[in-house]
Image (spheres, rainbow, N blue to C red):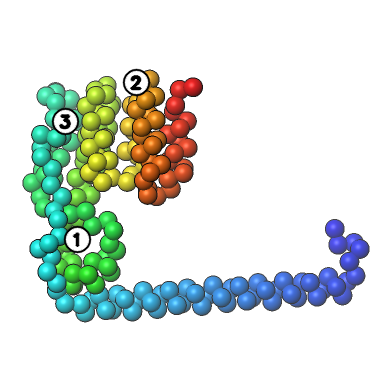
Amino acid sequence: MFSNIPFPSLFVCFLIFCAWLHYEKRKATREDMRASKEFWQRESEANASRNKDISHLPFFELDEAQIPLSQTDDENICYYQEKVRGCLALPMMNLSGYTNTDLKLSFGIGNFKTLSSYDENYNSFLINLSNLGKAYHMAGLLSEAEKTYLLCLDSGSDKAIDYLALADIYHESNDDKKLTALIDRVETSDLPRKESLLSRIRSKVIL
């Protein structure tokens, strides 16, 4: 490849490459240092921020009647039914749009623990609701599983596992109409790694 290139020219090219590589490394280091400095500066401001009114923040609330709670002897289903009921008794807020630093800056350091607990309760609800859908699916109760996973999505879940589980149910039911509707829903969303999720759902469409 380099047989026709004079040695001095090859050496100069090598030096230029080394200089460029050194420059890029230094540039990346400076950017990392700047990002780190900005983060700790914001975190310091957040930890000194005063409490602000949080009474206007909306709680996430759901009527128990919206959740499929079929009578069954299946222990796995019963376990997650009770877990979901327990979550509904706790105050919940969807604060997924905030980082910990954002929460403290926006509402004050004194409210951070309370708001974090509300957000944890919300995420715990979504996890247990998803597990309930999985339990229904494993028991062959496809209608209950579908309704439960749809409720997950309507409640704010952005987890690929919930979308894929719903796609599996539609695939097992040979329901391409609902699969297509699910694809449309994902296409118009701002879900993370959306293209990868769409590819996996589309693979389940029966041609």
Marks 3 and 1, how far apart at CA: 28 Å
Residue 162 is situated, as x and y percent measured from the top left of the image, at 32, 38
Q: Disc 1 vs disc 2: which is toward the camera?
A: 2
Residue ID for mark 2: 173
Q: Quadrant of residue 198?
A: top left
Please, is residue 153 above or below residue 91 in the view?
Answer: above
CA separation in Å, label 3 and label 2: 19 Å
Residue pointed to by mark 1 = 116
Amino acid, disc 3: Pro
Dot placed on the residue nearer the N-terminal end, 1 or 2? 1
Label 3 secondary element = loop
Q: Residues within 10 Å of mark 2 (few under 14, many from 20)?
A: few
Observer-side mark, 3 or 1, equals: 3
- Disc 2, SS: loop
Q: Nearer the viewer, residue 177 or 153?
A: 177
Residue 111 visible: yes
The spot of residue 56 in percent (x, y) is 12, 62
Considering the numbered disc 1 on the image, is that residue within a helix, a strand or a loop?
Answer: helix
Earlier-in-chain disc, 3 versus 2: 3
Q: Position of residue 175 (x, y in %)?
A: 36, 22
| Amino acid type indicated by mark 1 | Ser
